[in-house]
C-alpha cells in the first residue's frame, strides 16, 4: 500500500481570486470586478466564513498531515493579504499562493504544485470554498480510500480518479432558525468533499470540470452515506446555490449536534458570527 511519502493530501481554496473566468464578478471589466470583489464589507464577510466555518473544520481533522493552499490574486489589497498571512501562524497546514490572473485550471494547477512537498509521487487534491466545511474525518477517509485505489491499480500515473462523498448538510442562513438545516445526498458528485488522485505535474485536477460532469470524464469512487460536508447558503454565494427540492429537513438540535461532533464547529459561535458580520448581499 502507498505510504504517506507516496501520496500527499493537498487542498486548494480560491479566496476572492480575480482570475480569468470562473466567477460571477468577472462578467464585468477587471477594474469593476476588483471593486466588487474587494469591497470592505464583502471581504469582512468572506473572512468571517473562512475563519469560523472552513478553517475550524480543517483544524479539527483527525489526520493533520495535509496542506491547504489559499489561492489569491496579486490584485488583492495588501491589508487582506496580510490578514491571510497572519492565519498561517494559527494554522500550520495553511499556505498562501498569490498569482496574477489566469484561467481556473492553470491557476489551480499552480496552487496544487505550491502545496506539493517535492517528493510525493501522487497528490490527492481536494477543493473547498471559504464558506464551507468538511467532516473531521474527511482527510483520514480520503487518504485511506486513495491509498486503496492506488494499491488496487484503479488509479495510477495515467489514470486520475475522483473520490466523492455525496451526503452532507445544507445550511440556509437566510431562513428562520427552525428551517435552516437540511440533509441531502447528492445525485451527482459535488465539488465540495471531492478530491482527485493525480501526479503533481498532471494537466488535470479536481477543479477541471464542473462537478456535474465529473463522472463522465474520470473514474469516480463515491459514498452517499456519512455526513461529510457542510454547504452554506447565505444570499451571496458566487455559484447560486439552493436547497435541493428533495432534501430532508434536519431538526435544529440534531444539526447543532452534528456541527459540533462531525465538523468541529461551535453552533453558538457561528450564530454570533452571523449576527455581527456585515451584510454584503447586494
Image (cartoon, rainbow, N blue to C red):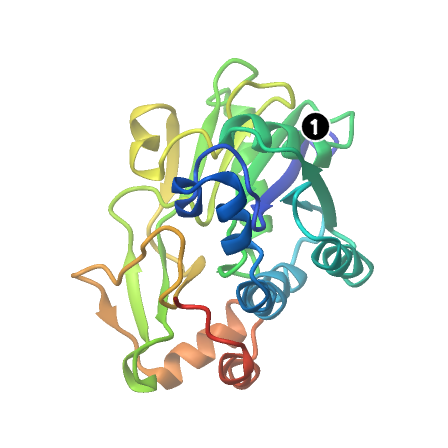
Tell me where residue 189 appears, x and y as whole percent.
34, 42
Nearer the observer, 10 or 141: 10
Q: Is residue 205 visible?
A: no
219 is higher (above) or lower (below) than 237: above
Q: Quadrant of residue 79?
A: bottom right
Residue 126 lies left or right of residue 69; in this view the side is left
51 is higher (above) or lower (below) than 272: above
**What residue would you read off at disc 1?**
6
Residue at coordinates 44% horizontally, 58% vertically from top-left? 229
Tell me where residue 71 appears, x and y as whole percent.
63, 43
Nearer the observer, 250 or 152: 250
Residue at coordinates 49% horizontally, 79% vertically from top-left? 274
Residue at coordinates 58% horizontally, 56% vertically from top-left? 38
- Tell me the quadrant of the picture where the N terminus can be found: top right
- Tell me the quadrant of the picture where the C terminus can be found: bottom left
Q: Residues within 10 Å of mark 1 (few under 14, many from 20)?
A: few
Q: Residue furthest top?
A: 158
Amino acid at each position: 500500500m502507498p505510504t504517506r511519502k507516496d501520496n500527499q493530501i493537498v487542498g486548494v481554496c480560491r479566496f476572492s481570486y480575480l482570475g480569468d473566468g470562473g466567477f460571477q464578478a468577472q462578467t464585468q471589466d477587471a477594474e469593476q470586478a476588483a471593486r466588487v470583489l474587494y469591497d470592505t464589507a464583502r471581504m469582512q464577510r468572506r473572512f468571517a466564513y473562512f475563519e469560523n466555518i472552513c478553517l475550524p473544520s480543517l483544524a479539527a481533522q483527525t489526520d493533520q498531515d495535509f496542506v491547504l493552499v489559499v489561492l489569491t490574486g496579486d490584485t488583492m489589497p495588501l491589508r487582506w493579504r496580510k490578514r491571510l498571512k497572519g492565519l498561517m501562524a494559527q494554522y500550520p497546514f495553511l499556505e498562501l499562493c498569490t498569482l496574477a490572473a489566469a484561467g481556473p485550471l492553470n491557476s489551480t494547477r499552480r496552487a496544487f504544485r505550491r502545496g506539493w512537498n517535492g517528493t510525493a509521487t501522487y497528490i490527492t487534491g481536494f477543493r473547498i470554498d471559504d464558506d464551507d466545511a468538511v467532516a473531521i474525518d474527511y482527510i483520514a477517509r480520503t487518504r485511506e480510500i486513495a491509498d486503496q485505489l492506488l494499491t488496487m491499480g484503479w488509479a495510477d500515473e495515467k489514470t486520475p480518479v475522483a473520490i466523492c462523498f455525496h451526503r452532507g448538510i445544507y445550511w440556509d442562513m437566510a431562513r428562520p432558525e427552525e428551517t435552516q438545516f437540511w440533509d441531502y445526498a447528492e445525485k451527482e458528485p459535488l465539488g465540495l468533499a471531492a478530491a482527485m488522485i493525480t501526479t503533481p505535474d498532471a494537466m488535470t485536477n479536481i477543479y477541471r470540470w464542473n462537478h456535474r460532469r465529473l463522472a463522465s470524464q474520470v473514474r469516480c469512487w463515491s459514498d452517499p452515506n456519512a455526513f461529510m460536508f457542510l454547504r452554506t447558503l447565505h444570499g451571496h454565494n458566487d455559484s447560486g446555490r439552493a436547497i435541493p427540492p428533495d432534501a430532508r429537513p434536519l431538526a435544529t438540535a440534531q444539526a447543532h449536534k452534528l456541527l459540533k461532533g462531525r465538523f468541529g464547529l461551535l453552533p453558538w459561535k457561528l450564530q454570533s458570527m452571523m449576527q455581527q458580520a456585515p451584510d454584503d448581499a447586494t
